[in-house]
Image (cartoon, rainbow, N blue to C red):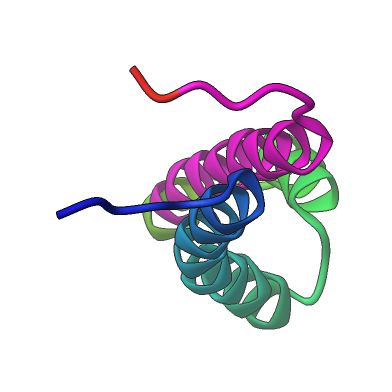
Amino acid sequence: MEVVISKKDLKTYEKLKLISEIVPIRERIKMFERKYNCSLEEFEKRLKEGEEDFEAWDDYIEWKAYVKTFKELKKKLKEIENAQGVRIA
């Protein structure tokens, strides 16, 4: 039996896989933005200027990790979209 997969199909599959990871992460980021009514950068400034709030710091650490992961996944997505050569190893 022979299985034939085009480069386009492979790229589409990889893109969909990444999108399925990106969407819930983006929703978590939006949840924090709604909760604190600001961006991560603005929230970071507030934390440094305000009184110590352990819950806010916990949220900050989680939020920052989501933003980092989101950026990494978006970068991978762009790499796949722009990939010229596809090789199966």
Eyeballing the image, is 45 above or below 13?
above
Residue at 58 percent of width and 76 percent of height = 27
Residue at 71 percent of width and 71 percent of height = 33
Classify residue 17 as left or right of residue 71.
left
* Residue 12 at x, y percent in the picture: 60, 59
* Residue 29 at x, y percent in the picture: 61, 65
Q: Nearer the viewer, residue 49 or 42?
A: 42
Please tell me how many numbered marks the rendered image carries: 0
Q: Nearer the viewer, residue 5 or 14?
A: 5
Asked if the stretch drawn in magenta spans residue 60, the answer is yes
Residue at 69 percent of width and 73 percent of height = 36
- By secondary structure, the bulk of the magenta-drawn segment is best described as helix
* Residue 69 at x, y percent in the picture: 53, 40
For residue 82, what is the image quadrant? top right
Q: Nearer the viewer, residue 35 or 64?
A: 64
Q: Residue furthest front?
A: 1
Locate the N terminus by quadrant.
Answer: bottom left
Asked if the stretch drawn in magenta spans residue 71, the answer is yes
Residue at 69 percent of width and 22 percent of height = 85
Highlighted magenta segment, given as a residue range: 58-87
Classify residue 8 as left or right of residue 2.
right
Q: Residue furthest left?
A: 1
Locate the C terminus by quadrant.
Answer: top left
* Residue 58 at x, y percent in the picture: 39, 49
